[in-house]
Amino acid sequence: MIQMTETNILVIDDEEMIRLGCKKILTDMGMKVDTAENGKIGLEAIQKKQYDMVLIDLMMPGMDGMELLRQIKQIDEKIVSIVITGYATIESAVKAVKLGAYDYLPKPFTPDELRTIATKGLQRRRLLLEADALRKERERNLLEIANERSRTATIINCMGEGLIATNRLGQLVLINPVARKMLRIKDVSIIEEYISNRLNNAELERLILETLNNGLTEESFVTKEIEFDKIEERIYSVTLAPIQEERGEMLGLAAVLRDISEEKKIERMKSEFVRLVSHELKAPTGAIEGYLNLILDGIVDEADSERLLSIIRKSRDKAVALQKLIKDLLDLSSIDAGNVARHLEPLTLKTILKEVTDFMQNEAAKKSLEINLRIPDNLPPVRGDKDDLNRLFLNLVTNAIKYNRENGEVTISVDVEGSFLVTLVQDTGIGMTKDELKDIFKDFFRAKNAFTRKISGTGLGLSIAKKIVESHHGYIEVESEYGKGSTFRVYLPLLSSALDRSMKNIHEEPSPKAA
Amino acid sequence: MQEKKRILLIDDDEDYVDINRTILETQYDVEVAYTGQEGLEKFISGNFDLVILDLMMEERDAGFSFSYAAKEHPKLKDIPILLLTSAPKATGFTFDFERDKDWLKVDDFAEKPLDTNTLLSKVEKLLSKKAGE
């Protein structure tokens, strides 16, 4: 209920007696009363002050009462106007009411008649104000609702998951851009269509329709993985949830689509890796078991002590190979784990390569191999982890020795190429076929042929090497000729190159011409 | 004294060759081939009573190439083949011998590694079956 703290009345009449009489009666009723002797003054007063009610004489010199009424309405529609008619006819009063006057008071009138009509008029004013307040309130609410709606729409349009909603009949009521993209729906006018054959995935359509057909309950939550594209390996996780009205009535279904292709891929790679690892572990343990069984089953005994010794030695070698494999697996996982434990520092490759080749000298001597180290002095340093780079070059040099021929050579050379330091590890060994080349950096890949059969290895050396190089923001290349040998090129970024680039940006001024 | 039966052992894994050869040589003459191709050449030229065959050698299906060629050869088709493989562990692909024997084209099948007694009894069974025919 609107409380009018103060009631302001304006009386516009050219007769002073009427003005004073009205003012007296209305003031006695507790109202504040102003008076105006003609329409012009009256209008000026209304423009300056907020009046609740205006009493207007219809017949005045100057401005006609009807015209005044019209102009007052333009200023404030909610002012209650009451026309006072003298010798004018009832018809003109009715005309005034049609123009927006609330009521009319014929002259001469008694104080009671004025009081009654003023009271009625003020009630009218109160109602008008109340209605206006309500309308404003409602408009504000509507605005809020509109904002809320657009806010929700914005969120739905921007969310990372696909969202589809259908009514109980299976008609599409909402689909966000992500869902359109995920389901490759190009058709713009799909809203209100039945979803059958419209979602580009029969399984999803069936899932939604079946859930709808089973009758929606609060428990109609379903989560399912749906393969959307076999070739691209797109797999979506779909969660269906009933859409429920406040009173509990089921309105339809919402389906949230999440692309889980990457997770699935990683999951598959992990289990594939575990399977490969177990197979690789089985081979040496199976061999150890087999050798020991030869002894335990009495197939080889002291009668042939040389054979017995060779079998024991072979089991030991397999145990060593197993340890090497486990070490490589640990290396692999520590590289995969990322840079956490990596200690980066400026390193001189010459020192590392010298250490590695010294360490491998014995192995090389067994095959009468010559190791050539061609490293210029004053090489710029690289930034890296010493242990990692040691392991990297140890793996490459080990391979260059293992897969070399008797009396062959291993040549290691380093040079600057652009912003990289390039290390070449060349051998004169068996080389690789094109087919072998494309797989050599894969986990557990080992070339299988008559020559490599005699060479033990985990098949992890090069995949570890590649991972180390890449974790140092470098890259590795290989070139090979079957039967002749292989060359591995390791590119490691120079320590200064990154620094140089950022310095260049600071000193962008044209430099003086070099002499 | 009866002459020893001859077995052709085809496998590219040095350790399995070493172990199985040692076991088999207690009772049989054993010849080794490290590839399917080498195996087929030896099989055709030699006079064998049984073949023990690995599946995945230099080629993943080298064993199949061998068994299919052998079972189509008029003189060799009746010589039993024992397929010995770790393929199920290496690839996740499993065999059911009873279900798959028609297309495996071998006479018996076992997963590596095989203990001494099982290997010998499987070999003996295949050899006596052949003799009984």
Image: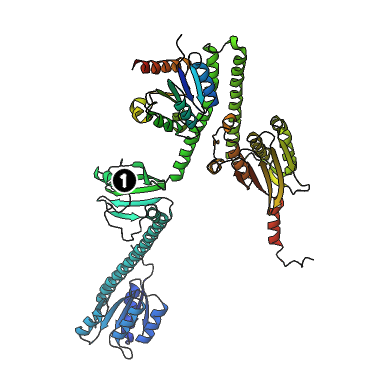
Q: How is the image coloured?
A: rainbow
If the image is split into quadrants, where does the C terminus of chain A sit? Answer: bottom right
Q: Counting other residues with Cα less than 10 Å from the Cα at mark 1, is it few (<14), some (14-19), or many (20 or more)?
A: some
Determine if residue A37 is in view: no
Chain containing the residue with disc 1? A
Q: Which of A493 and B1 is in front in this view?
A: B1
Percent x, y of residue A199: 32, 52
Q: Which of B92 and A146 is in front in this view?
A: B92
Percent x, y of residue A316: 61, 21
Can you tell which quarter of the image residue A392 is in?
Answer: top right
Can you tell which quarter of the image residue A64 is in?
Answer: bottom left
Residue at 35% x, 62% y: name it.
A142
Residue at 55% x, 25% y: name it.
B14
Residue at 68% x, 61% y: name it.
A505
Q: In this view, does A146 lie above or below A57?
A: above
Residue receiving disc 1: A203
Percent x, y of residue A103: 25, 77
Under tag 1, what secondary structure? helix
Determine if residue A350 is in view: yes
If the image is split into quadrants, where does the N terminus of chain A sit? Answer: bottom left
